[in-house]
Image (tube, rainbow, N blue to C red):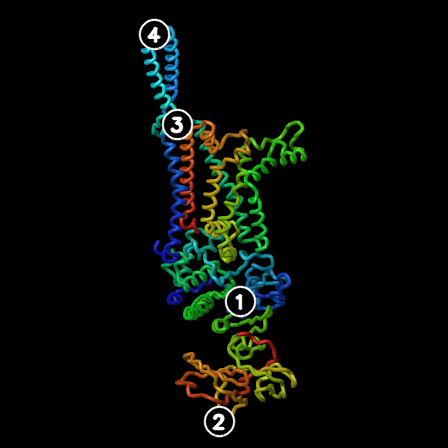
Amino acid sequence: MGALVRTYGRGLTTVFVALTVLWMLGMIIVPQLFMVERSLWTRQETSQITLQIDRLYNEISTLQFDAQAAADADKPAIEDRISDIEEEIAELEAQEKAPQRVYTLSNYTRMSGLHLRIFVRTIFYAALVTVLALVVCYPIAFAVAQVATPRAAAFLMLGLIVPYAINELLRVYAWLMILDYQGVLNTFLDWVGITNLAAKQWIPFLESPVSVFVAMVYAYILFMVFPIYNTLETLDRNQLEAARDLGAPTWRIHLRVAIPHAKPGIAVGCIMTFMLSAGSYAVPQIMTRGTSGDWFSQTIYRQFFESNNWNVGAAYAFTLLVVCIVFIFLMMLIFRVGVRDIAR
Amino acid sequence: MGAATAMPADTTMRGQDVVLDAVSMVFGDFTAVHRTDLEIRAGEFFSILGPSGCGKTTILRMISGFLDPTTGSVRIGGAEMRGIGPNRRPTALIFQNLALFPLMPVWENVAFGLEARGVGRKQRRERAMELIDMVALRGHENKLPGDLSGGQRQRVAIARALAVEPAVLLLDEPLSALDLKLRQHMRAELKDIQRRTGVTFIYITHDQGEALTMSDRIAVMNQGRVEQVDTTDVLYDDPATPFVATFVGEQNVFRGRVAEVADGFAVIEGPDGRLRGRNRQKLAPGDEAMVFVRPERMQFLNGAALDNVVSASIDRRDLEGPFVNLFLKRDGNEIMVHLTNSGAAGRDLGGEQRVGFAASDALVLPAGELARD
């Protein structure tokens, strides 16, 4: 802090600190606390109250009928009784509108078997997407960083970046068109003679999770390529040559020299890809259109906007967040990188 | 270095000869190495000396296998090397920046070549420890290269290269990053290791002092061509071209035209008068020529006479310690005289002086390109 003041002066330092605090509070801490708070309570059941209110309304109707038939002397007593009941109804209706919060962990503990299955499957698939992306991206990153001439590297980079100028949804829809029942791939297979579109014999790519994998790997490829590329670019080419000169075959050079060097980048890439794919909503939504099971993000969406149960939705979302954070620490442990390496 | 004496004579290593036969290397429209023949003998300390960009590194890469020559062939121990990758050649390369693996401890660095050859962990650690002993690094085997000093890293690089028992060790200016004292120490150490192992050393450098002190023979390169290959003494005393003459050591240069030739000597006439020197390249009268004299062969003439005499005025005196450099000016030409410091050398000199040199200490060469300082 002292150093910051010395370098930038009091005014600018105040701005820096204020912005940082604002960011931390406004974008991270407050929304998360809000979510956590939501996830910790449930509304008290209101059906009992509703029933009670209905019963009281019925009673009023009966009393009003009685009042018409009753003698004048009895009327004030009946009307008193009615106004008493109306007061009671108002009280109950107020209760119905603002239900009582009951703080409980039940939002976390009562996840149904189906939702749990979706949750586990989503985490497993996200991990699989991460591995797939790593397998695809490491060679690309290596080629761009170490093998290609500067000119070729620039073109490759451009080729990687250009699709990202297009909206993510459109990129996913492109895959939809390729993998659809009568999409590009099936049409090609029809032309080759493997499928027969006229007879509705096609390969239902979209009904298998593979289509989601493909679209996700494509959608998040840059987030894996760039961190790996960044670390590999700093690898001294002499080290690769030294390893080759000492007799190492290509696989050993990668295993012993290049991959250890790229570890922080691989860790960052894996973390980003995992987080994005575990939380992806658009890709599974568009690609499967319900023909394959939900991803957990879709389940969370349903809790919020279809079941209108924000409390369970918040609990689900928070659970996903916790798993992602655990994944981050797991990655750092596996790749033996510290926060500082990642920040580099 | 204490441990060098304890090093066992390693009989498993044996140097091989390297032959470059009509080799050239062209990149696009740039010729890095013009047609070159070079023969490096088995077990010799051979240096390739030249300014940066002269093609010496390209030659090194052709021998190590990272490049195949555009024309001609490289043979090591008589075997044609074209198409054989660096991992299958009997060479090991020490890089200018050493290229140690920063994430591996010292012993794994040294053992990497053995690991690549599938030697078991226990065995390669044993062998690595032998080499670590040889370069006096015992106690550092589990450190990372980043925790070592410059000289220690140098030794790790040497041990790592020697671990694969190469027939030819290629060194790409590995001492350039060290400070002077350490560099001088490492020169002796390298020379010592070369003698003990008998491995052929090919040393690339732009530092003529380094090349002269360590090498058996030196090839001097300029602009993709080898200008001269000779032993260090011959190279120093009888340079073949003006470039070699001025790139290796200091020279005083006098220009002129050959006036007469006789008995292996030539007299040239120029702005500095008539100067006589050895005419080894048999120049004829009328040829444009240059006379080269080493500063240490020049002397001040206190009335004495010598074959060649030039008058010039003292410009400045640089005390180097064991010797003194005196710079004299004459019509824009600078003359340098090297005096041994046997007590206040040249301190009282000033004004116009007569300096001279024997004809046998001067060399007449055809006029040509000089090395840039």
Query: Which residue is found at the position 47% from the left and 37% from the top?
Result: A279
Query: Quick one: SS at disc 2?
Result: loop
Chain label for disc 2:
B
Q: Is residue B351 above or below residue A181?
A: below
User: What residue is disc 2 on?
Assistant: B303
Give the x, y percent position of residue B63.
56, 62
Of marks 2 and 1, which one's residue comes earlier in the chain? Answer: 1
For badge 3, the amino acid type reads Arg
Q: What amino acid is found at the position of numbered circle 4 in the picture?
A: Asp
Which residue bears the numbered disc 4?
A: A72
Labels 3 and 4 touching (C-beta < 8 A): no
Q: Kindly check if marks 2 and 1 are in contact, taking CB atoms under 8 A apart as contact.
A: no
**Inter-mark Cα distance, 2 to 1:** 52 Å
Chain designation of label 3: A
Please give the chain letter of the residue carrying mark 1: B
Q: Which residue is mark 3?
A: A110
Q: Nearer the viewer, mark 2 or mark 1?
A: 2
SS for callout 1: loop
C-alpha separation, residue under disc 1 versus residue under disc 3: 81 Å
Viewer-nearest residue: B87 or A325? A325
Q: CA distance from mark 3 to mark 2?
A: 114 Å
Horizontally, residue A72 falls left or right of residue B115, namely left
Are dots 1 and 4 on a single chain?
Answer: no
Q: Position of residue A84 (x, y in %)?
A: 33, 16
Residue A282 image point, x, y percent: 52, 36
Q: Which residue is mark 1?
A: B42
Residue A69, quarter of picture = top left
